[in-house]
């Protein structure tokens, strides 16, 4: 079907139409009212899929590792979705094309759905587009969704860390504990993978990770360290066992529900923040804004006073914060 109506597309996707799934994901990428409608329609249908984030530096072998994990999952008979997330421009190609090429083994497998995604203007970017995309695949009946990011920048770590289980991939010679802490990897990692473990430096990488984890504050769960050689398929089955083990731990401890609740908190805050940001841009234009700007330039009004005027017009009132508190007597 070629409909662009979200309601019709969701019905078709639930019925197994992969073309409808693709068009829904395109709507999510573009953002706007259509994306919001997709989110409204798919949210009640979801909650079943288990998401697995895979992040790591470019060249660490994430795509090859994901490809091998899909092979392991398919041998169990389970269907699986893969979202290859690229925060860069969709016009640059690069990693997007590379991900597709490396996963060609599954191109004819109806039980595997692979999609490369980039933000094209979604309000809030990938931080909001990714959970919506996962919900589309969830609504389409895919019980497992891998979310692979292209690097370890802030956006990528946040996106991968929003999954139920987060796998961080490193290579021999990757760096030390300080580097791991700076990248935020220790905070989001549930499982560490040393890929290309047949190369010199693999054991040093393991020692570095163990040292970093010794100093990290973790509650109840210490991330296991799995060694793999993805191109040869070595260690991938063990990695999948670790992922399943983490899933079981989350489910039995109640942490899975707690994590998902925290993600909803984060998502709601992000949506509100982006809406307020959009409203702020709308308020900071036109004749009223021009008059306030002139008053500030003429030293008739200070910037804070002008901002208060704008916020009053928005109905936001005076924002709370340390600057607004009464001074302490101490």
Image (spheres, rainbow, N blue to C red):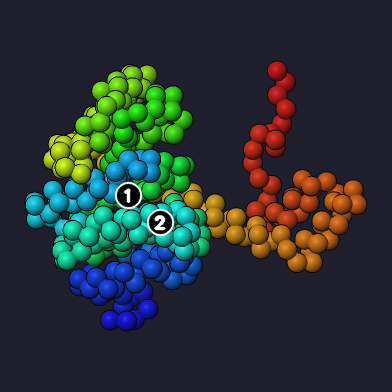
User: On the picture, is 321 further left or further right than 229?
Assistant: right
For the residues labelled 1 and 2, the Cα–Cα distance comes to 15 Å
Evaluate if marks 1 and 2 touch, with contact meaning CB atoms under 8 Å apart: no
First in sequence: mark 1 or mark 2? 2
**From this viewpoint, is residue 111 visible?**
yes
- Residue 137: name its quadrant: bottom left
> Disc 2 marks which residue?
94
Say above or below: 12 vs 193: below
Q: Residue 80: image x %, image y %?
A: 20, 56
Q: Nearer the viewer, residue 210 or 233?
A: 233
Q: Residue at x 77, y 45 (%)?
A: 304
Residue 271 in picture, x, y percent from top left: 49, 55
Which residue occupies 26% across, 36% down?
Answer: 195
* Total count of labels: 2
Element assignment for label 1: strand
For the residues carrying marks 1 and 2, which lies nearer the camera in this image? Answer: 2
User: The residue tagged with tag 2: helix, strand or loop?
Assistant: loop
Q: Residue 171 at what x, y percent from top left?
A: 31, 34
The tag on residue 148 is: 1
Taking the view exactly as shown, the residue that stands out farthest to the left is: 76
Q: Which numbered disc covers residue 116?
A: none
| The N terminus sits in image quarter | bottom left
Name the residue at 31% across, 69% down: 22
In the figure, is residue 284 to the left or right of 188? right
Position of residue 65 relative to residue 316, above or below, is above
- Quadrant holding the C terminus: top right
In the image: residue 327, left or right of residue 205: right
Residue that extends furthest to the bottom in the rendered view of this protein: 2
């Amino acid at each position: 079907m070629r409909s662009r109506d979200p309601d019709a597309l969701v019905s078709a996707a639930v019925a197994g139409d992969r073309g409808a799934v693709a068009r829904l994901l395109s709507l999510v990428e573009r953002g706007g009212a259509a994306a919001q409608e997709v989110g409204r329609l798919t949210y009640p249908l979801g909650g079943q899929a288990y998401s697995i984030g895979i992040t790591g530096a470019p060249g660490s072998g994430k795509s090859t590792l994901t490809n091998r994990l899909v092979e392991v999952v398919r041998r169990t008979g389970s269907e699986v979705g893969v979202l290859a997330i690229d925060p860069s421009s969709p016009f640059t190609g690069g990693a997007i094309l590379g991900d597709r090429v490396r996963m060609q083994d599954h191109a004819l497998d109806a039980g595997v759905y692979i999609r490369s995604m980039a933000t094209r203007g979604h309000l809030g970017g990938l931080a909001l587009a990714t959970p919506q995309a996962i919900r589309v695949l969830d609504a389409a009946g895919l019980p497992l969704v891998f979310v692979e990011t292209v690097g370890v920048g802030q956006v990528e770590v946040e996106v991968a860390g929003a999954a139920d289980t987060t796998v961080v991939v490193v290579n021999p010679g990757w760096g030390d504990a300080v580097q791991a802490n700076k990248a935020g990897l220790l905070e989001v990692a549930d499982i560490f993978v040393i890929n290309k473990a047949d190369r010199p430096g693999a054991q040093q990488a393991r020692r570095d990770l163990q040292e970093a984890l010794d100093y990290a504050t973790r509650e109840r769960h210490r991330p296991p360290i799995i060694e793999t050689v993805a191109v040869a398929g070595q260690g991938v089955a063990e990695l999948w066992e670790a992922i399943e083990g983490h899933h079981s731990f989350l489910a039995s401890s109640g942490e899975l529900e707690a994590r998902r609740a925290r993600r909803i908190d984060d998502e709601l805050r992000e949506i509100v923040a982006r809406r307020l940001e959009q409203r702020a841009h709308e308020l900071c234009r036109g004749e009223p804004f021009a008059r306030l700007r002139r008053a500030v330039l003429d030293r008739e009004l200070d910037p804070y006073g002008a901002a208060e005027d704008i916020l009053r017009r928005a109905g936001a009132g005076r924002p709370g914060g340390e600057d607004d508190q009464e001074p302490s007597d101490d």
